[in-house]
Amino acid sequence: MKFSIITPNLDQGAYLPECLESVKNQIGQSEGAKVERFYVEHIVMDGGSSDASRDILNTWMENIQRISLPGYSFRFVSEKDSGQTDAINKGFRQASGDLLAYLCADDFYESGALARVARFFSERPEAEFVYGGYNFVEGSSGWKRAKRPGFFDGKRLLKNNFLGQPAVFWSQKVYRDWGEFDPDLRFSMDYDYWLRALNANWIYAGDPPLASMRLHFDGKTGKYISEMWHETGQVLHRHGAGSFGIWHAKWMELMGGRLYLLRRILYAIVGNFLRRRNR
């Protein structure tokens, strides 16, 4: 069983090393139970970063070639693309794994995540998607807020995207059946993909969280939240969602930037307080 993990990156060098480590460190990790043996192919698609990203990737490649870790392969491409969706699609065209996922450069996997996912795919051969819980990581405070999506419900998904993108994995069969992400979408390409595959076999991996998503102002969500919610509304309309989801997207398009800013400030205060208390 082989995973192909695609990481799109553009000027996220501050977070990239943690992402790279979290993928590599999956090799040899387990929950103490018998697990399916798996391999990891990690492909980073760098969009021509102007920060330290390419130096980080070159150094990482040199170190990996030196240690030759069995079960793990790494390569990267650094070239201009037409955006994150294009980068992800290019990565998947190169992928050779049985199981696919993408992990943004400012996110990371939790310990033992891929071992758990491999076990679910091994024990449930009908599975086409396996997904699990995830964390939101608040800026520089490191505070993790756990999110538990619960068992799959297509009607609920049409109202609200309860899936955490880095905690979703799918089979090559899904890729053959449903193809690539829509290249015309910049923000909601994953949500659109889940809705396209609404009738696939979805398996919930339960606790603990599989991945962590970092919330910060340099991220795409923080910079373009109104545009993101505008596109989300279009995706919901495309898939025949009810009025609740579409009107919620409209509301967030208007107010989402203010709410995002308020939440980040509030959660940064709480996160920094908890960090000082736990020293």
Image (tube, helix red, strand yellow):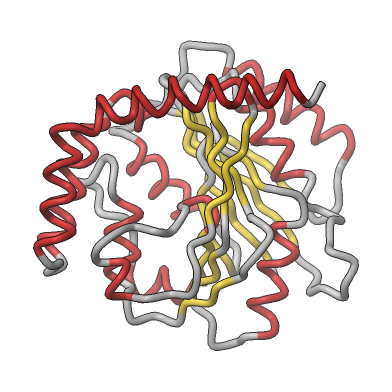
Vertical position of residue 207 compared to residue 17: above or below? below
Q: In the picture shown, does residue 12 fall above or below 137?
A: above
Q: Residue at x 35, y 24 (%)?
A: 262
Q: Is residue 257 left or right of residue 115?
A: left
Seen at 11% across and 52% down, the residue is 247
Left or right: 260 as drawn, with respect to 110: left
Image coordinates for residue 189, horizontal then vertical, percent: 30, 51
Residue 162 against residue 43 in the figure, above or below = below
Work out which quarter of the rendered image holds the N terminus and state it.
bottom right
Q: Is residue 263 left or right of residue 102?
A: left
Nearest the camera: 207 or 195? 207
Q: Residue at x 57, y 63 (%)?
A: 132
Percent coordinates x, y for residue 218 in the rendering: 42, 20
Relative to 259, residue 14 above or below: above
Q: Of residues 110 and 264, which is closer to you in this image?
A: 264
**Left or right of 267 in this view: 111:** right
Q: Position of residue 273 (x, y in %)?
A: 64, 21
What residue appears at the point 45 percent right and 24 percent down from the top-left corner? 266
Q: Residue furthest top?
A: 51
